Amino acid sequence: MADLKLLKYLESYLTEHRRERFTSVLKQRTKYFTVATEDVYQLHNTSAVIRSCDVFGIQEVNIIEEVNTKRIDREIAMGAQKWVDLNRYNTVNQCIKDLKTNGYQIVATTPHAEDCDLIDFDISKKSCFFFGRETEGLSQQVLDEADCFLKIPMFGFTESLNISVSAAIILQHVTSKLRNSDIPWQLKEEERIAKRFDWIEKTIKNYDAIVERFKSESLF
């Protein structure tokens, strides 16, 4: 059980604006939907996807680096990696296994499958949206494991959108539908408390020393 007295003590080191900001953002956070990127080559694309996840309230991003291993581009993510949880995987198999264990359906985003248009996507199931490499798209393994396929309708000569643009369009649509539904999509209370501790640690200086000070003062 989280120490709520410690949490209150730590929050006293934040400005009132920052405390209110944490509270308001956490109310809009969800793990009902998540995203996975598979061996995205261009560094700025993964970083931009993380930024979109933060903007649309997606708390977790799954990054598969089976072929391409890249650091997160901090400038393009604009600090979003501080607020979004990154789950990193060396294999597609392990990522999919973990997601399915946690109750997610695998949604392959591809312009080539004649399946579900974005506007018709059923939000009633927890879902992870997979985005693939810039030129090759998703691997055959992801396509074979997918529970459904999702595409953004396009009417021009170009067959596909940049991965970061696709992610932003899809996330804006599905999260808007989710927030207008009766589905319990918000983080659980214990998850919010854990995130408050995490974000405070990433915000204030000398976090460990402050925690030790609280513990020593609590002895008297």
Image: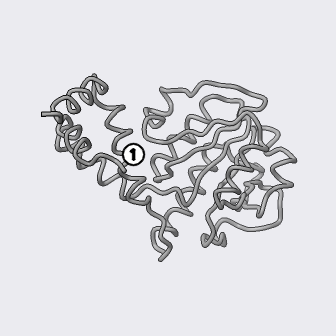
Q: Residue at left 23%, top 32%?
A: 215
Q: Residue 139 at what x, y percent from top left?
A: 83, 44
Between 135 and 64, the residue placed more toward the observer is 64
Element marked by disc 1: helix
Of all residues shown, which one is farthest toward the bottom? 182
Q: Residue 8 at what x, y percent from top left?
A: 21, 45
Q: Residue at left 82%, top 40%?
A: 136
Q: Which residue is mark 1?
A: 195
Between 44 and 59, the residue placed more toward the observer is 59
Q: Residue 50 at what x, y percent from top left?
A: 54, 40
Categorize mark 1 by other alpha carbons within 10 Å: few (<14), some (14-19), many (20+): some
**Does 14 sit left or right of 25 as displayed?**
left
Residue 212 falls in image quadrant:
top left
Q: Residue at left 48%, top 57%?
A: 30
Q: Name the quarter where the C terminus is drawn.
A: top left
**Does 197 sit left or right of 90 as displayed?**
left
Circle count: 1
Residue 73 falls in image quadrant:
top right
Of all residues shown, which one is farthest toward the left? 220
| Display colour scheme | one colour
Q: Is residue 39 above or below residue 3?
A: above
Between 178 and 204, the residue placed more toward the observer is 204
**Does 98 sit left or right of 8 as displayed?**
right
Q: Residue at left 72%, top 61%?
A: 150
Q: Is residue 136 above or below residue 107?
A: above
Q: Is residue 111 above or below residue 22?
A: below
Q: Residue 51 at what x, y percent from top left?
A: 50, 41
Q: Amino acid at mark 1?
A: Lys
